[in-house]
Image: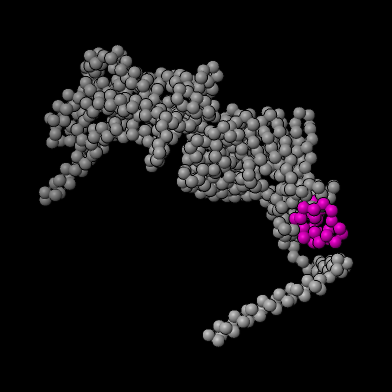
Amino acid sequence: MEEKKLDTKSIIGFILIFGIFVFMMYQNQPTPEEIEAQKKAEQEQVEAEKKESKQEESLVTTSNDYVNTQVLDSTQKAALQSKVGSFAYALTLPSAEDKQTTVETDVFELKFNNKGGHLAQVKLKNFVDYDSVPIYLVKDNNSAFNITFGTSDNRTLNTQDFPFEPTVTKSGENTVVSMKLKVSESAFLEYRYELKPKDYMIDFSIKSQGLSGVFNTSQPITLDWKQKGIRHAKSITYENRYTRLTYMHDDGKVDKLAQMGDDDEIVEDVEWLSYRQFFFSSILVANDSPFKDVAMTSKNLVDDEEIDTLFTKTYSSKLPLAYNGGELNKSLGLYYGPTDSKTLKVYDKGLDQSIPFGWGIFGWINKAIFIPLFGFLSGFLPYGIAIIVMTILVKIMLSFVQYKQFLSQAKMKILKPELDAVREKYKDNKLKAQQETMAIQSKAGASPLSGCLPGLMQIPVFYALFQFFPTAFDLRQKSFLWADDLSSYDSILELPFSIPFYGSHVSLFPILAAVAIFFYMKMTTGQQTAMQQPAQEGMPDMGKMMKYMIYFSPLLMLVFFNNYASGLSLYYFVSNLISIGIMLVIKNYIIDEEKVLAKIEVSKTKPKKQNKFQKKMAEMMEQAEAQKQAQQKGRKK
């Protein structure tokens, strides 16, 4: 208790002493003249200490070292020189103030950061996003552009930390923006941007003048370009599926980082790299010589569509630059614009290959057939009607394939009673039954494969169109019937909850396509089931599998395409309606089963020679049967 009282008293005493001290300080405070004299003395002492320690200060710089001031005395200039070396001059210029330079063209509204010298905003004037907001490819610090270099006095500096002096001039119809990081009035590092009317490609160069003695050419110099993809589409998950870092290297090879998830790669001889954001791209082009050993990364930013709603992916690239005679001189191109094949082809650099038209034959079909065809049709027809007309033309082109399929099915249906009788007759001898079946089919000119092979011919067309519609820029924000954007889903009902793999809305075109697929498969599968051979022992029952497919395929269409481009679902809906119509016409008006049967009977009377494939199959079957009989005899012994 005594200790507690002592503590309380001590505290009160300290408070009283502190109060007395404050009062005395107030009573004895210096006069204004004394304060001024003291400040002057302290300032002189600080300046003296700076002079003494100038040679011992660290060469490591921080952002605090880049003071935006225009009027410096000799002492301050000396201190700044000790921190950033020759580049201290840039911090004494009016451009050192943190401002932006704004320039407009027919297609751009651009803002350049005086600090760092690169673009702070890229607005595309002719486009808006799904919510009628202007399209920005660069905005609110989503992009960084920095060169890291060494100096002859053993410093490592970053251009993003320094102010550039801007000038805007005219060169004919072109607008030239020059951003200079100065060492003196005649020595500088320059970013030069030349903007042309109605052009999305900016001629961009990185040049130095009078810096051969400033740069440390033995130290690597690296350009670091980072950018986050800003969301532009109604479904960020769907948009993210077509947002991908794509690059050309090794004299024309085009590759990509991972479509989903994170990925990184180190690639040699990169000619251009594209930060593709679905329907818009930011592309850096090496005009003079490819970049060596480029380190690229892509990071997915959409884990949850409900939470991650602003950005799709983060891209970054580290690109090595090279000195030439101790100076920099790199000619580049900066493309900010639509991911549109017609626009990208103009530059004759293979930039249109950044669009995922499909690999191999699928891409060739799109480039050679569907892109020109759709471009022609949409030139004089509404876009929805152009899709329908193109679908009709494609189905007419493939109608001979359907005819071959139905003719094969008709032959197999006619032969089914005879084939069933053969299988029953030789039910204890599988080899003989198969040989007789093949003989009958060969004489009749019918084979199950003859119906499958024409169907396989449709797969390249099917996949090519699957790639075409989601990447067709012309469909973007074009309406048809209830769909307000043929490049996005056509929502007719918003759900108060989200269904896994389906979404929080209901699209009508996928429902119509699913219904059409169901009836088409019901008709075709019913005919195939009627001629289906009995399942062999140890083999899957194809009849049951085909019945399951009748329901599985429409369900897959219903769920998978609910978030896909409504133009693609419109195509499948119309395509299956036309297929049903063609099937009914072929079945009821073109293929006459009596005439087919008559041709089969005539074909049976003609001698048939086995081709090499048939001979080989017969030999393999005989060997298999002989091996089986040998095994059975061995078991009996």
Q: Is residue 78 above or below residue 19?
A: above
Q: Is residue 105 left or right of residue 272?
A: right
Occupied quadrant, residue 42: bottom right
Q: What's the magenta bit mostly, secondary-structure-wise?
A: helix
Q: Is residue 77 magenta?
A: yes
Q: Where's residue 275, x and y in %?
A: 58, 41
The magenta span reads 66-90
Residue at 65% over, 33% down: 200
Q: Where's residue 83, x and y in %?
A: 77, 60
Residue at 14% over, 32% down: 426
Q: Is residue 503 left or right of residue 443?
A: right
- The answer to which of 282 and 151 lies nearer the viewer is 282
Q: Is residue 459 magenta?
A: no
Task: Say whether residue 477 is visible.
Answer: yes
Q: Where's residue 79, x and y in %?
A: 81, 61
Q: Is residue 593 above or below residue 440?
A: above
Instruction: Name the colouring of the figure.
Output: one colour
Occupied quadrant, residue 284: top right
- The answer to which of 231 and 576 lies nearer the viewer is 231
